[in-house]
Image: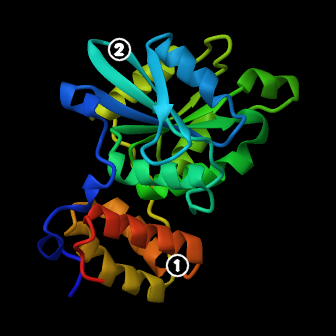
C-alpha cells in the first residue's frame, strides 16, 4: 500500500504543527541561517523584548520565539537552530528541517554573512528548493565593506528568484526594509519565483512518480518535490530522517 492520506488516516503535517500563534492570525516567520551569521542579532532587532525561549519538543535544542507588528499585521518569529544544511546529520539540522516542512512558515528568512556569502548560500539554496516563500537577508554588509567586499543584492535576487535584503543588524541598517519585504511575501503582495533545481531525466522521472503520493499526504508541490528528492537520496541520514518524519507524521499508521 502506498503512502496516501487515506491509508494514513491523517495528513503528515501533524508531526510538528504550525505554531499555535498562527491560529491567532499571526504570520509565522522562520529565521534560518548558518551559525555566526548574526541571526540572533537579527532576531532581537526584529522582536525587541517580545520573545520567550524554551526547548523543542523532545529535544535539548533551545528555541526562541518573538513577536512584532508591521503595517497592522502581526508576526511571530521562530528562531531555528543555526545549521549548515538540511541534510539532518545533527539534531539542530533535524529540528530546523522538520519545522520548515511541517511548521509551514509563511515566510522563511535566511540570514547570511556578507563576508562569506558563498558558503552561506548552500543552506539558502536548499531552503529555496523546499519552499519559494524565502527572503535572503545579507547581514554584516558593514563588515564586508571594511574588507572591500560589495554584494550586488539586486543581481543575487535575480539569480535566486527571491527577495534579497542587505542589512547590518547591529546598527539597525536594512531592518525596516526587511520587515517590509517579509510583510509583502507573507501577504502575497510579492511572490518569489525561484527557478526549479534541474535534475537528470532519470531522477526527474522518479520524482514525477513519487511526488504525487507525497502531495496526497497534504504537502504543497514544491515541498513534495523536495521530499521526493530526499527519499531518492541514498545518503543514509537524510533518507532515514525523511522516512521517520513521514511515519511519525502519520502517527505510525502509514503502510511501509
Q: Which residue is mark 1?
A: 233
Checking the image for residue 78, the label placed there is none
| Residue 201 spot, x, y in % from top left | 46, 86
* Residue 248, above or below 113: below
Residue drawn at x 33%, y 38% is: 106
Closest to the observer, 119 or 242: 242
* Residue 161, above or below 186: below
Q: Which residue is mark 2?
A: 70
Residue drawn at x 24%, y 67% is: 215
Q: Report whether residue 51 is seen.
A: yes
Q: Residues within 10 Å of mark 2 (few under 14, many from 20)?
A: few
Q: Residue 251, located in which quarter of the rendered image?
A: bottom left
How far apart are the alpha carbons under marks 2 and 1?
41 Å
Q: Quadrant of the C terminus?
A: bottom left
Q: How is the image coloured?
A: rainbow
Q: Quadrant of the N terminus?
A: bottom left
| Residue 235 spot, x, y in % from top left | 59, 77
Horizontal side, residue 6 vs residue 14: left or right: left
Closest to the observer, 228 or 79: 79
Horizontal side, residue 116 vs residue 207: left or right: right
Residue drawn at x 68%, y 15% is: 170
* Residue 77, above or below 211: above
Q: Residues within 10 Å of mark 1 (few under 14, many from 20)?
A: few
Residue drawn at x 27%, y 55% is: 13
Horizontal side, residue 10 vs residue 102: left or right: left
Q: Residue 244, located in which quarter of the rendered image?
A: bottom left
| Residue 185 spot, x, y in % from top left | 35, 34
| Tag in front: 2 or 1 | 1
Closest to the observer, 244 or 2: 244
Horizontal side, residue 188 vs residue 194: left or right: left
Amino acid at each position: 500500500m502506498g503512502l496516501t492520506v487515506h491509508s494514513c488516516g491523517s495528513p503528515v503535517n501533524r508531526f510538528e504543527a504550525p505554531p499555535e500563534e498562527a491560529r491567532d492570525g499571526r504570520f509565522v516567520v522562520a529565521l534560518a541561517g548558518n551559525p555566526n551569521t548574526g541571526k540572533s542579532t537579527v532576531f532581537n532587532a526584529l522582536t525587541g523584548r517580545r520573545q520567550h525561549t524554551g526547548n523543542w519538543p523532545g529535544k535539548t535544542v533551545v528555541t526562541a520565539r518573538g513577536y512584532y507588528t508591521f503595517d497592522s499585521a502581526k508576526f511571530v518569529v521562530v528562531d531555528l537552530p543555526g545549521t549548515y544544511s538540511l541534510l539532518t546529520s545533527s539534531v539542530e539540522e533535524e529540528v530546523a528541517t522538520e519545522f520548515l516542512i511541517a511548521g509551514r512558515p509563511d515566510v522563511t528568512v535566511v540570514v547570511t554573512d556578507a563576508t562569506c556569502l558563498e558558503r552561506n548560500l548552500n543552506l539558502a539554496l536548499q531552503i529555496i528548493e523546499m519552499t519559494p516563500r524565502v527572503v535572503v537577508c545579507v547581514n554584516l554588509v558593514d563588515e564586508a565593506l571594511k574588507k572591500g567586499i560589495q554584494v550586488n543584492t539586486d543581481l543575487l535576487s535575480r539569480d535566486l528568484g527571491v527577495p534579497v535584503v542587505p542589512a547590518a543588524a547591529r546598527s539597525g541598517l536594512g531592518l525596516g526594509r526587511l520587515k517590509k519585504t517579509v510583510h509583502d511575501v507573507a501577504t502575497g503582495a510579492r511572490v518569489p519565483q525561484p527557478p526549479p533545481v534541474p535534475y537528470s531525466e532519470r531522477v526527474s522521472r522518479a520524482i514525477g512518480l513519487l511526488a504525487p503520493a507525497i502531495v496526497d499526504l497534504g504537502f504543497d508541490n514544491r515541498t513534495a518535490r523536495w521530499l521526493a528528492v530526499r527519499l531518492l537520496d541514498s545518503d543514509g541520514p537524510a533518507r532515514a530522517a525523511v522516512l521517520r518524519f513521514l511515519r511519525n507524521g502519520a502517527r505510525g499508521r502509514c503502510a511501509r
